[in-house]
Amino acid sequence: MQITLKNKLQPTEIFRIKRMKEVIKTTQPHGHKDYLEMIYLTEGAGKHHIDFHTFEVKPHSLFFVLPGQIHSWELQEIPKGFVMMFQKDFLLDTKLYDWLFQKFPQPLQNGYDLSNAFAEFQYLLLQIEEENRLQNSHYLDVIQAYVLLLFNKLKRLDPSPSGLVPSALIQSFFSLLNEQYANFREVQAFSDHLNVTAKTLNNACRKFLGKTTSDVISEKVVMEAKRRLLYSDDNLAEIAYELGFTDPSHFNKFFRKQTGVLPGLYRKGIS
């Protein structure tokens, strides 16, 4: 199965806000091309699948779909709410840029329940929508200010953030990992390309994530393996080779060590 990459933004468009289509639908798994999508629903019921996680759709739920993620809907009631789309450049000069667009590890929780704060968030979204409709002078700057306020309010509800800003080394490591996870498996290979010692890279990972560099690499490979097992029709041998394993049996052993189950059983269970 080929996963569709949708691009709802025009080439020169860096931001859009619209109302959620008020239709009951089930969509095919798809991704978004290089932009972040935020969906806040005031009404609705069903399921929202994002990568290999399933979230309940209910009033005042908020979801993110990051670049590279795959999602689909199984709606059982008419949804109402807002959809915002951001190109990376929209928040490039803000402190939120790395928090939002750091692809791995995923910086955000998902399926926020805003039942106890919906009035505040709904007000901000209505203001953003109005600014975007009127498009008065400096309207994008005003929208950006509202967006920054919205996300900083949202960060207060996230129980998981460490509060640490990723260092330049960690950002470079994440970027390299996203590009080379199928080619590099050893910590030394990453540290050599980053011109630091393996110990320095390991210390940076422990400080920011509380994990070793090796653990982070393994988590990335497992995440990509799960995506392929869920959304691809490739057989296990093909997936193993795509992920850089020279022998499918090595992939089986690796996946079982990391998850506790063989990849074939994992695929069968989540399908």
Image (cartoon, rainbow, N blue to C red):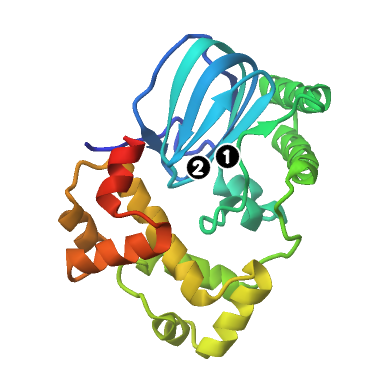
On the image, the x and y values in percent for residue 204 come to 62, 78
Classify 10 Å Cα crowding around label 1: few (below 14), some (14-19), many (20 and above). Answer: some
Secondary structure beneath disc 2? strand
User: Which part of the image, by quadrant, shows the N terminus?
Assistant: top left
- Mark 1, secondary structure of its residue: strand
For disc 2, the neighbor class at 10 Å (few under 14, some 14 to 19, many from 20) is many
Viewer-nearest residue: 194 or 228: 228
Give left or right: position of 184 versus 76.
left
The total of numbered circles placed on residues is: 2
Find disc 2 in the rendering and name its residue: 35
Q: Amino acid at mark 2?
A: Tyr
Q: Residue at x 55, y 53 (%)?
A: 106
Is residue 67 left or right of 19 when viewed as pictured? left
Cβ–Cβ below 8 Å for labels 1 and 2?
Answer: yes
**In the rendered structure, which disc, 1 or 2, sits on the residue that comes first in sequence?**
2
Residue 219 is marked as: none
Seen at 50% across and 38% down, the residue is 12
The spot of residue 78 in percent (x, y) is 54, 8
Q: Which residue is mark 1?
A: 86
The furthest residue to the front: 260
Q: Quadrant of the C terminus?
A: top left
Residue at (58% x, 49% y) in the render: 89
The answer to whether any part of residue 231 appears in the image is: no
Q: Look at the picture and state if 115 lies above or below 166.
A: above
